[in-house]
Amino acid sequence: MGRAVVSKGEVRPIRSLVYVGAANEAAVTRAVEADGDALFLDLEEPQFPYGPTERQHARQAVGEYLNSLTDRSQRTQHFVRVNAPATGLTIADLAAVLTPSLTGVLLPKTSGASDVHMLDGILTCMETERGLPVGSTQVFPLLETAEGVRDAFQVAAASPRVTYMGGMTSRFGDIYQAIRYRWTPRGDESLYLRSKVLMDARSAGIRYPVSGVWAGWPNDAAGIRTWAEAQRDLGYFGMFTDPDGIGLAHDVFTPTADDIEFWAGLIAYGESASRGGDSTFLWPDGQRGGLHAAYLESARMNLQWAQELGL
C-alpha cells in the first residue's frame, strides 16, 4: 500500500475513531468489519492485566494485521496508540507496527511540544531506515495532562505530522487525575477543556478535530447521542467510539441531504444575486437573512467536507 506525506489541510474527516484492544484479535476483526472511518489499535494498555507476554503478543498481532492490508482503495485509516517515549517502550512498539499501512500514531499523555518533537525524531529515523517517505506517519497527540491542555496550541503546531487532535474526557482516568473534575453526563465540567483544545487545534491548522469518547454507560444510546451532538455543535467532526457506536457517530457527524441541498442552493443563489438579483434568503429554520460573501465561502467549505465524506 502506498504512503504519502499528508499536510494538515489534506487529511480526511474522521467521524468514528474506533477503539479496539490490540491484543484481542477477534475484537480487531469485528472492528474492521464494522466499517468505521479509522481504527485506533491500542498498544499502551489494551487489556488488564497487561504483562510482557501480552504486550509482545499485541505488537505481533497488530504488525501482522497491518502487513496483511493490500487493498489500496480501502478507506479505513489505521492509527496505533504506542507507549509514550518516557516509558522506553516506544521504539519497540513502532518496530512492530511501522508499515506502509499505518496511517499514524496516537501519542498518549502528551504534555508539551517536546513530546511531539521526540516522537517526530524517532519516526524520521525509522521511516528512513525502512524506506518510507519521511514525514508520512501522522501524529495524533492525546492531551491527558493539565500541561498538555494548557499547551495545546504548541502541541498542535509542533510538527507538520500533527494532523488530528481534540479534547479528551474520562470518567476516572488520566485526564480526571490531571483536572480532578466530577464527571457528569452533561459534560459541563469538561466544556472549557474541550473548547480550549478545539480552539487551539483549529488555530494550529487542524482541519478536522476529533473529540474524545463518551465516558458514560456504553448502553446509554440517548446519552451517547446527546454527547455526540454536543461535540458536533461545538465544532468537532468526529469522536472516539467502540464498534457498536459507529452507526450513531456517522449519523451525527454526517451532513444530511437537506444540509447539502441548502449549501448548494445558497451558492447558486449567491451567483444569481451577484448579477443584481435579490440578496435576501431563508435559513433552514425559516428565518430571513441577508446574503454575505462569508456565507458563500462557508457553504463551499461545507460542500467540500461532504465531498470528502463521499457524499
Image (cartoon, rainbow, N blue to C red):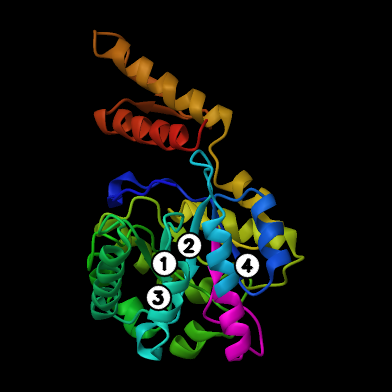
Left or right: 232 as drawn, with respect to 146: right
Other residues around mark 2 within 10 Å, as few (<14) / some (14–19) / many (≥20)? many
In this view, the residue in front, 190 or 4, is 4
Residue type indicated by callout 4: Val
Q: Which label is found at residue 105?
A: 1
Q: Which label is found at residue 143?
A: 3
Other residues around mark 1 within 10 Å, as few (<14) / some (14–19) / many (≥20)? many
Looking at the image, is 146 positioned above or below residue 260?
A: below
Left or right: 272 as drawn, with respect to 104: left
Q: Is residue 183 visible?
A: no
Which of disc 1 and disc 2 is earlier in sequence?
A: 2
Looking at the image, is 92 positioned above or below residue 274?
A: below
Please tell me in which quadrant of the rendered image residue 152 appears: bottom left
In this view, the residue in front, 9 or 175, is 9
Residue type indicated by callout 3: Leu
Magenta stretch: includes residue 109: no
Q: Which residue is mark 4?
A: 20
Which of disc 4 and disc 3 is earlier in sequence?
A: 4
Find numbered disc 4 in the image and state the secondary structure of the residue it sits on.
strand
Residue type indicated by callout 1: Val
CA distance separating discs 1 and 4: 14 Å
Q: Residue at x 38, y 59 (%)?
A: 164
In this view, the residue in front, 52 or 14, is 52
Q: Residue at x 35, y 77 (%)?
A: 149
Q: Is residue 56 visible?
A: yes
